[in-house]
Image: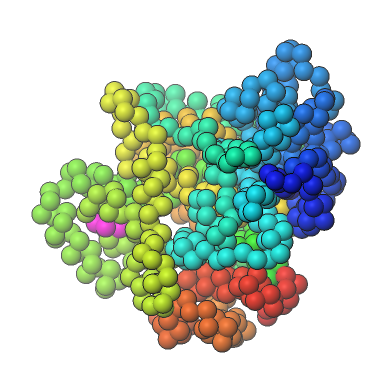
Amino acid sequence: MCGICGIYDRDHPEINEDILLRMRDVMIPRGPDDAGLHTSPHIGLGHRRLSILDISSAGHQPMANEDGAVWITFNGEIYNFRALRGALIGKGHIFRSFTDTEVLVHGYEEWGMEGLLRKINGMYAFALWDRAAEELILARDRLGVKPLFYMEREGKVYFSSDIKSIYLASEKDLTLDLCAMDDFLYSCCIPQQRSIFREVRKVQPAHFVSFRRRGSSARRYWDLRFTPKLKMDGNECLRELENRLFSAVRARMISDVPIGAFLSGGVDSSLVVALMAVMSGSPVKTFSMGVREESYNELKYARMVADRYSTDHHEFIVEPDALGVLPGIIWAYGEPFADASQIPSYYISRLTREHVTVALTGDGGDESFCGYGNSAAYYYAGRYRKYVPGFLRNGLLPSVAGILVSAAGRRGAAGKLKTLTEYGRGSFRDTLGMGGIFGAGLRDGIYDAGFRQRLNGHNPVDIFEECIADADWSEDQSAGRPDEVDKCLYIGIKTALPNDYLTKVDVATMMNSLEARSPYLDYELMEFAARLPSNVKMRRGRQKGLLKELAARYVPRSAVYRKKWGFGIPVGVWFKRGDMSDLLHDVLLGERAARRGYFNMDRLRGLITEHLAGKADHACRLWAMLCLELWHLMFIDKILSKSDKLI
């Protein structure tokens, strides 16, 4: 894994190497093993290297073809590079290294950009300069595992794996995108092409962007299709899933440096570890994270798997003082981010890097195999609408659910009935606004009137509508139509997966110079899963039922068939400690925060009071606002340093 950056100047042949070096070397943790720079008329490319394959000097980047007509700076891994390398050698291409980077250079020469991208299987973000065409091409992998930001300004294009490179190249002179901030407060991350800065954009997953003298254009080269549905019985599905997952794990175990695995104790990572152990000739190194609060702790399940496969197991307990690293984490993300599992993700990555350079993860299993609660909600809502008469569905049952929740809270059967009536009452589009850290009602109450006016009608839910409108659904009726579960999964794969979960893993691992690989993100495995009918993925009506049935062959059943826990920390409990409570008041209710004009300060004070008194759980909201204000103190006010201590 590496860090890449560069400058394309359409109008001037000279590239400012000082700026390019500044952009490159803010990314040292992404690539501590080597650094490279290439400049020629109109183009400058930078690279920081974390050596994984062919760790010799032959893998130095930026890398060129034989005559220097094509240059590349590459971040990622191409898992099928050996087969592609053989094919290219058969066509007469000469290789000087055994890297996947060089496969991209010769692959572009042979097949062109779109042809190359359709052939490669991996996680990647790269920039390729074609000297003859005077064209810069930025490309990103199908799922958005690796990040890539860019900015066009005054005839120049700046790009980088890290938004801070562009922030520094611009002399910190960028404009806040308030709509992106609104998206962040809804989703805890900034989705799609937006960034926190109006001038900076992200290359979208499964897209490449071409820049020439006279303009730029973006093109999508892949999309996930949910039809035609596969017609296989349950046993056939299990065999096919097992074979595909074995292949995906095997491909991600190829490395010239030590390799291990994150083991959370959940189904996804446990199954990956089990398959690694079956294929490995030595004990797999596994790494787990826990907290003192038992209701958040999955360590006992991780130990079950570690014991069954005699792994070389390591554990780390995250204590409340772990929040002392928050300024460093705020700096590492470069833009607001508020998934609280960013803290344990950092610590598990730090522990893992002490022993290995590559770690396999379980990321992506939930997205493909219906692991989240909203997948189950849509699954049962479809049946609810189909079989329950309208007078019950739209009248009596919602009233009963409301009474039960008022009396007993949103737990157990009452909560399930309430969710069912909410998702089953209207159409799929009616449900898109459900959820979010700040839903519509609370958003209107907490936002300052002036801030709402400046948003000019922006609605964070619109991005979900756009995903559905943009989807490449089949028009062939015989192929079957995607159902609501399919649409739910598609939205998650397009939004939360790249912008929340994969961003979190990328930043946490790169802070520690660790490469993360997830077999579940193999695009061919995801294509197979997408074409399975929802009732197959939800086998026997269970979330992730098919995957759990496979996991039960390899993992103790008590670790498979249990309540799903998130990989998080009890930040809501920690906020009630004296020092953390003081931090909330000092940061969120401080003079600088008030002057920004984002929030109604009386309502914000009320949120804090309600949470600390135990009258309501506002942990996610308070965490989001804390991360947002700390980001402002660091990147806008420039008075907070990444090395500062908060508590």
Closest to the observer, 128 or 266: 128
Q: Is residue 478 above or below residue 410?
A: above
Q: Residue at x 69, y 61 (%)?
A: 170
Q: Is residue 132 above or below residue 94?
A: below
Closest to the observer, 535 or 580: 580
> Which image quarter is the N terminus in?
top right
Residue 134 in view here? yes
Q: Position of residue 157 (x, y in %)?
A: 66, 48
- Whether residue 421 appears in magenta in the rendering, the answer is yes
Q: Position of residue 369 (x, y in %)?
A: 45, 40
Extreme residue toward the front, this view: 11
Q: How is the image coloured?
A: rainbow
Q: Residue at x 43, y 74 (%)?
A: 451
Extreme residue toward the left, this view: 391
Q: Position of residue 57 (x, y in %)?
A: 89, 36
Region of the chain picked out in magenta, as a range = 419-423
- Whether residue 202 appears in magenta in the rendering, the answer is no
- Residue 44 appears left or right of 484: right
